[in-house]
Amino acid sequence: MAATETKTTSRLTRGLFRFGCLLALAACIGGVLNLSAARLERDARPAGFTRGLLQGALMPLAMPNLLVGNDVAIYASQNTGRNYKLGYSLGVNLCGLTFFGLFFWRVSRWRRRNAPVPRAANPVQ
């Protein structure tokens, strides 16, 4: 019983540590995104495809800052139009594909590793 409790506690501690690291990383990236957005807003040139791609990829990571009340710019108001929007959409989708692809790959790997071994119904003797 004690070994099971220790294993569960260890797994919970590891999961909470990973979640905390992910939140800290996301907050740092969101802060950098906010600083870079403020600097780029001073630029007279409108945002193009590349900046849209970058802001789209980093947009989901701005959520922790938004949740704690920081105003993080996640979209450039001065943009080139279609090119910026294409870059932004592509960035959001690539970020989602990467995150959810890795997540579902890990879940399927975990299921295969923890799947019960099938036994033969009628073993040949």
Image (spheres, rainbow, N blue to C red):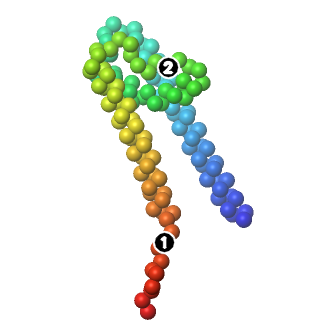
Q: Where is residue 57 in the image (x, y as percent from the top left)?
A: 39, 30
Residue in view at x 55 percent, y 33 percent: 24
Report the number of discs: 2
Query: Left of 14 or right of it: where is 93?
Result: left
Residue in view at x 42 percent, y 46 percent: 102
Residue in view at x 50 percent, y 23 percent: 31
Q: Where is residue 116 in the image (x, y as percent from the top left)?
A: 51, 69
Location of residue 6 by image quarter: bottom right
Mark 2: amino acid: Val
The crowding category of the residue bearing disc 2, from other C-alpha atoms within 10 Å (few below 14, some 14 to 19, many at least 20), is many
The crowding category of the residue bearing disc 1, from other C-alpha atoms within 10 Å (few below 14, some 14 to 19, many at least 20), is few
Q: Nearer the viewer, residue 112 or 45?
A: 112
**Which residue extends farthest bottom?**
125
| Secondary structure under the numbered disc 1 in the rendered image | loop
**Which residue extends farthest front?**
121
* Residue, disc 2: 72
Q: Position of residue 49 (x, y in %)?
A: 28, 22
